[in-house]
Amino acid sequence: MSPLVTTPTDPGVLRQAFGCFPSGVTALCALDSGTPVGMAASTFTPVSLQPPLVSVCVQDTSSTWPKLRGQGRLGLSVLAEGQDLVCRSLAAKNGDRFADVDWQAGEDGSVYVHGANLWLDCSVHSELPGGDHTIVLLEIHGLKAEPDRAPLVFHGSRFRRLAG
């Protein structure tokens, strides 16, 4: 192994290093004036059981987060294996992110992706600054889980499968 880089300031080096840690991929979505708005987020973490909290990290340059943060409820879908194209669509910079995404709206304006292995009905609990990101704590109000469905895993800048 090469020696440690003592001051890792190169974003490319940091991105590659962070890519060494596999993560699941989520979709954070809601209705905005009747139209679905959403984004993909791979920085999802369970935080607390009491109160039930999870976190996602959102780039400060995101143009989607300002549209989502003001919604009363947000749908968080943990994407499942085989939903690579859904993830890419929700991460797109241009075009209709929901054009090829099978989704469902909740009565409260939350939006969920069909085929995901977990749906969380959430509201923004708090936001914390985190460098060039905002750490968003979300309070869970309801859930639907399908734990036998394999998750979508992102590692080393590509999607992977869990060994079975």
Image (cartoon, rainbow, N blue to C red):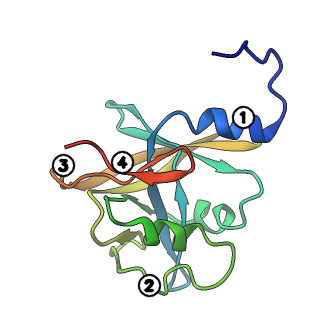
Indicate the secondary structure of the residue bearing disc 1. helix
Q: Quadrant of the N terminus?
A: top right
Residue beneath the point at 62% across and 72% down: 92
Label 2 to label 4: alpha-carbon separation: 27 Å
Q: Position of residue 9 (x, y in %)?
A: 84, 30
Label 3 to label 2: alpha-carbon separation: 24 Å
Label 1 to label 4: alpha-carbon separation: 31 Å
Q: Position of residue 164 (x, y in %)?
A: 19, 43
Is residue 51 found left or right of 7 in the rendered image?
left
Tell which tag, 2 or 1, sits nearer the viewer: 1
Mark 2 Cα-neighbour bin, 10 Å: few <14, some 14–19, many ≥20 = few
- Amino acid residing under circle 3: Pro
Mark number for residue 93?
A: none
Contact, mark 2 vs mark 4 (Cβ under 8 Å): no
Label 3 to label 1: alpha-carbon separation: 32 Å
- Amino acid residing under circle 1: Leu
Residue identified by numbered label 3: 147
Tell which tag, 3 or 1, sits nearer the viewer: 1
Residue beneath the point at 44% across and 55% down: 26
Residue identified by numbered label 2: 100
Q: Is residue 53 visible?
A: yes
Indicate the secondary structure of the residue bearing disc 2. loop
Which sits earlier in the primary sequence, circle 2 or circle 1?
A: 1
Q: Position of residue 95 (x, y in %)?
A: 64, 84
Residue identified by numbered label 4: 140
Which sits earlier in the primary sequence, circle 4 or circle 3?
A: 4
